[in-house]
């Protein structure tokens, strides 16, 4: 019988998420994970958290939190800003320096 784990406020803390799942006895590919918002934003490993969720999409369910909602609202502004050559150059520099 599989278990269900409800997780909130990961905020990009991949290592903390993995430790918590390990400590709780989570069984990969057996147990269900329900994330109740704020998967990303403050932490340094946002991409790893998203990759983890994507890799386990068959056993993961997500309820969007306020941080996800804020990013959705900002997407149209990101697209407008990206049309500005100075902003594109700045963003390219940031992405080259902070690949995570």
Image (cartoon, helix red, strand yellow):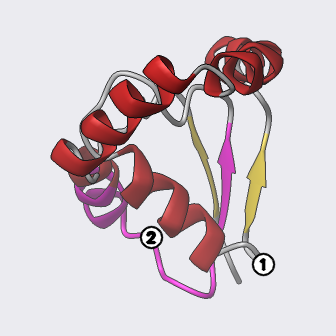
- The residue depicted at 59 percent of the width and 63 percent of the height is 53
- Above-or-below relation of 33 to 95: below
Q: Residue 65: where, in percent of width, then height?
A: 70, 20
SS type, badge 1: loop
Q: Residue furthest left?
A: 97
- The residue depicted at 22 percent of the width and 56 percent of the height is 19
- Above-or-below relation of 9 to 73: below
Q: Residue 6: where, in percent of width, then height?
A: 62, 43
Query: Dot 2 corresponds to which residue?
Result: 26
Q: Please say whether residue 11 is one of the residues in the magenta stretch.
A: no
Q: Which residue is nearer to you in this view: 87 or 39?
A: 87
Query: Dot 1 corresponds to which residue?
Result: 58
Determine whether label 2 and label 1 are within 8 Å by CB.
no
Q: Residue 55: where, in percent of width, then height?
A: 59, 78
Q: On the rendered structure, is 38 left or right of 13?
A: right
Q: On the rendered structure, is 44 left or right of 69?
A: left
Q: Which residue is nearer to you in this view: 20 or 74?
A: 74
Q: On the rendered structure, is 75 left or right of 8?
A: right
- The residue depicted at 61 percent of the width and 19 percent of the height is 84
């Amino acid at each position: 019988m599989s278990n269900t784990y409800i997780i909130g406020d990961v905020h990009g803390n991949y290592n903390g998420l993995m430790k918590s799942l390990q400590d709780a006895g989570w069984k990969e590919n057996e147990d269900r994970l329900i994330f109740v918002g704020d998967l990303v934003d403050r932490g340094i490993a946002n991409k790893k958290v998203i990759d983890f969720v994507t890799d386990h999409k068959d056993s993961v369910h997500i309820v969007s939190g306020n941080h996800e909602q804020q990013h959705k609202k900002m997407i149209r502004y990101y697209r407008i800003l990206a049309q500005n050559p100075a902003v594109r150059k700045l963003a390219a520099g940031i992405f080259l320096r902070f690949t995570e």
